[in-house]
Image: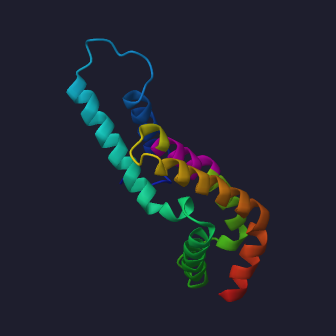
Amino acid sequence: MATDIVDKDLKKLRNDRWDAAFADSDQGPHVNEDRSRILKATIVIEHLIQASDVAHTMQHWHVYRRWNERFFQECYQAYKDGRAEKDPSETWYQGELGFFDFYIIPLAKKLKECGVFGVSSDEYLSYALQNRTEWEERGKGIVEEMISKV
């Protein structure tokens, strides 16, 4: 599934396909241009689907916070109801930093690289970087605040 971000093998496959589609090296005359365009289009669509799933992380801080808190509440309620084994509050702060570093920011860079959003790509990457910085500074307190609300 295009939005599965937990499967490491699938992530590697996607990254390898991206690298193959957007390689800087000259692929020579033997590469079929139509096939290359189709591969690029397919990869870009996969990444757009991924971005739509996490779009809140590449928008203004308040948008990110609202959706992050809703997801936290959902996960925390699942834990309280016995549908999840681990208390998300124990890893939420650090998990968000890793999420930005290893998924969101690389995804925003890829969207910028392929040019599908034009100049808006700069904005998405900029918001992702700003939100990561803001989370690093304020995230621990925010997690405590979110726990007090549930």
Query: Of all residues shown, which one is farthest toward the bottom?
Result: 149
Q: Position of residue 94 (x, y in %)?
A: 71, 60
Is residue 124 visible to the viewer in this orientation of the structure?
Answer: yes
Q: Position of residue 44 (x, y in %)?
A: 36, 43
Viewer-proximal residue among 62 and 65:
62
Viewer-proximal residue among 89 and 80:
89
95 is within the stretch colored magenta: no
Majority secondary structure of the magenta segment? helix
Q: Is residue 150 above or below residue 132?
A: below
Q: Is residue 90 left or right of residue 36?
A: right
Which stretch appears magenta?
101-111
Q: Is residue 128 above or below residue 79?
A: above
Identify the residue at image location x=77%, y=68%.
138
Identify the residue at image location x=54%, y=59%.
58
Q: Is residue 115 above or below residue 50?
A: above
Q: Position of residue 125 (x, y in %)?
A: 56, 50
Identify the residue at image location x=39%, y=28%.
20
Query: Of all residues shown, which one is farthest toward the top?
Result: 29
Viewer-proximal residue among 112 and 104:
112
Identify the residue at image location x=61%, y=79%.
76
Looking at the rendered structure, the number of numbered marks drawn on it comes to 0
Query: Of all residues shown, which one is farthest toward the front?
Result: 119
Q: Position of residue 131 (x, y in %)?
A: 65, 60
